[in-house]
Image (cartoon, rainbow, N blue to C red):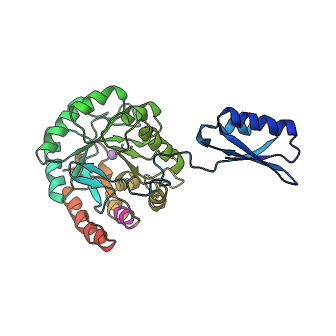
């Protein structure tokens, strides 16, 4: 960390800075220039409280040298993290497509959805049993019964399941139903207690980007999970809030190559919640794969018009099949497969 002192900073103020830095176990390297003094704090700078240093008398500016995240940073961990979920890999050569409905509704709906997901060639299935809804009067999900329905349907087609965890109190249910990937939704990206708890598990986690989270905030949330010992984290870009109201969210395609440079974790994209319309899903999926995404999370419903949640953005079974057929040559063109 570099601390730039104000031009009129006194020796007393500079010495106070030195003592503060040394009290954290770091070394202070003081460089006195003609116009101002610059202090380098050498050591584990993440433990320094940047705001506290900034507020000390005589300090002009404090600049970080290292990234605030450590375990998830590409720096010092050049190899891509490859996550195995029952034979399906994330972060390797294969672009992994997860298909399924927004929410678990009935056994019949999930049985059909599982069949169509498998028939389209997806290796994993999504479906929410606990739904984060804007309105408290909207369908909130089937809860634990939904986990049971989902597991039963997916097992018929050997599909690993991805489902959202909203509350630490349901973690035991998630373990009981052997949820294969725990999804942390956009609204909970900064629910730090939830992140700490999934950090203690071994189950892979899909960490969605918060509604208006910066890349740095998002990676710090991933760091929370990793710091607990669970390094099986897949980041999911799902569009961010913007000034544009013509579609649901703005897919941040730039985030994909940026994250691949910044972190070794796999990065997937949810084109359904980004666009919010079924007809946008194909174009956004192609953009995501072309930009280097390691997978997609796509909503499909056996009867989209009858979906209890997010009907507008659900693909029909046929549309999912067509999408998969369109994506295969695209993946091949960039040296990957589906
Ligand atoms: C979902 O995937 O079901 C969901 C609610 O998405 P998000 O958290 O991205 O809004
Ligand atoms: Mn949805």
Residue 140 x/y as whole percent: 32, 33
Vertical placement of 14 versus 282: above or below?
above
Give left or right: position of 172 versus 39.
Answer: left
Label total for image? 0
**Residue 287 belongs to the span the image colors magenta:** yes
Please name the predominant secondary structure of the magenta segment in the image.
helix
Along the line of sight, which residue is nearer the eye, 141 or 9? Answer: 9
**Residue 246: % across, % down:** 46, 56
**Residue 36 point in image, percent of width and height:** 84, 50
Q: Does the segment drawn in magenta span residue 270?
A: no
Residue 7 visible in the current orientation: yes
Region in magenta: 285-290
Instruction: Pick out the residue farthest to the top.
Output: 169
Residue 94 falls in image quadrant: bottom left
Task: Kindly identify the residue that appears in the image at 46 percent across and 46 percent down.
Answer: 71
Specify the quadrant that holds the C terminus. Answer: bottom left
**Residue drawn 27% across and 41% down?**
103
């Amino acid at each position: 960390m570099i601390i730039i002192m104000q031009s009129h900073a006194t020796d007393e103020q500079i010495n106070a800075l030195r003592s503060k830095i040394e009290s954290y176990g770091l070394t202070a390297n003081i460089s006195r220039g003609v116009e101002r003094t610059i202090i380098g704090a050498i050591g584990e700078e993440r433990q320094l409280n940047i705001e506290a240093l900034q507020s000390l008398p005589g300090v002009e500016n404090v600049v970080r040298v290292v990234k605030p995240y450590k375990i998830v940073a590409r720096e010092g961990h050049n190899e891509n993290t490859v996550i195995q979920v029952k034979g399906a890999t994330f972060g390797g050569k294969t672009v992994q497509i997860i298909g399924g409905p927004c929410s678990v509704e009935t056994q019949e709906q999930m049985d059909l959805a599982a069949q169509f997901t498998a028939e389209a060639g997806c290796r994993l299935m999504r479906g929410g049993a606990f739904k984060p809804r804007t309105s408290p009067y909207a369908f909130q999900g089937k809860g634990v019964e939904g986990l049971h329905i989902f597991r039963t349907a997916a097992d018929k087609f050997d599909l690993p399941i991805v489902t959202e965890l909203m509350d630490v109190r349901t973690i035991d249910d998630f373990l009981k139903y052997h949820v294969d990937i725990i999804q942390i939704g956009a609204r909970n990206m900064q629910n730090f207690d939830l992140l700490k708890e999934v950090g203690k598990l071994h189950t892979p986690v899909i960490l969605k980007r918060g509604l208006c989270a910066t890349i740095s905030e998002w990676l710090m949330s991933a760091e929370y999970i990793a710091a607990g010992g669970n390094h099986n984290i897949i980041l999911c870009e799902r569009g961010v809030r913007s000034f544009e109201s013509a579609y649901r969210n703005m897919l941040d395609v730039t985030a994909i190559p940026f994250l691949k440079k910044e972190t070794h974790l796999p990065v997937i994209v949810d084109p359904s919640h980004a666009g919010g319309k079924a007809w946008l899903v194909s174009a956004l999926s192609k953009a995501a794969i072309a930009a280097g995404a390691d997978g997609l999370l796509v909503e499909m419903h056996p009867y989209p018009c009858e979906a209890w949640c997010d009907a507008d953005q659900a693909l029909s079974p046929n549309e999912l099949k067509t999408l998969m057929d369109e994506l295969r040559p695209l993946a091949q063109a960039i040296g990957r497969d589906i």
